[in-house]
Amino acid sequence: MALISDGRFIEDGWRRLAEEEALPKAGKVIVSLARLQHAIDVLGPESALGVIVPNTTEPSALIEALPRLGLVSISFPAFADGRGFSLARLLRRAGFKGELRASGRLVADQYAHAVGCGFDTIEIPDDLAERQDEEQWRAALNAYAMSYQRGYSGSGSILEARRRAARP
């Protein structure tokens, strides 16, 4: 899997554990939602803990664990399934400050929107990374300076810019 951050492919410092794999004593590990409570109970503070969740997860299922989590990875089963974007916004509004990762079938055209929703990194399958290289992802990230929705870009919304321009 390729991992993208700030328009660049980067190395992943996290290790995703298989369901049957034992929890390590230290390191950065990602567990499933089903294993999350057990991992919280077993792992000490020297272990960085992440969780991968389906895009259908209710934010309430994660609220109590958010202070302990360094990463929440939200699965995207198909590029046309945008429920993960909504979940990301809700987790940021709930106060999650750690790394928010989109994982799955996203395309470069969705990158700016993903960042606007609060994602820090995007993990995509190798077949997609081969079709859309790092340069395409970087170009897609920088393609839009503004959006129609408030709060999705650092420079304000298109509607706010039009209102400012129309004032005498």
Image (spheres, rainbow, N blue to C red):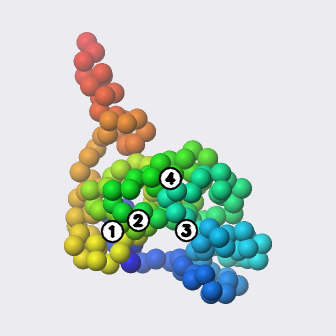
For residue 62, what is the image quadrant? bottom right
**SS at mark 1 in the image:** strand
Query: Circle 3 is placed at which residue position?
Result: 52
Q: Can residue 44 be seen in this view?
A: no
Instruction: Give the residue at x 37% y 36%.
Output: 149
Instruction: Give the mark, 3 or 4, whose residue is nearer the N terminus.
Output: 3
Instruction: Residue type at mark 2: give it.
Output: Pro
Residue located beneath label 4 in the image: 88
Q: Which amino acid does label 1 sit on?
A: Arg
Number of numbered callouts drawn? 4
- Helix, strand or loop at mark 4: helix
> Looking at the picture, which amino acid does disc 3 mark?
Ile
CA gap, disc 2 and disc 3: 13 Å
Q: In which quarter of the image is the C terminus?
A: top left
Residues tagged 2 and 4 counted as in contact (Cβ below 8 A)? no
- Chain-order first, disc 1 or disc 2: 1
Residue 126 seen by the camera: yes
Rounded to the nearest whole Å, what is the CA distance between mark 3 and mark 1?
22 Å
Q: Where is residue 56 drawn, in percent x and y?
A: 52, 56
Expressed as whole percent of the image width and height from the top left, the position of residue 141 reads: 29, 56
Sort mark 2 into few (<14), some (14-19) or many (20+) by Cα contacts within 10 Å: some
For discs 4 and 1, the disc positioned in front in the rendered view? 4
Name the secondary structure under disc 2.
loop
Asked if labels 1 and 4 touch by Cβ distance under 8 angstroms, the answer is no
- The residue at 46%/77% (across/down) is 12
Q: How far apart are marks 2 and 4 (CA)?
A: 15 Å
Q: Name the residue under label 2.
A: 77
Identity of the residue furthest to the top in this view: 168
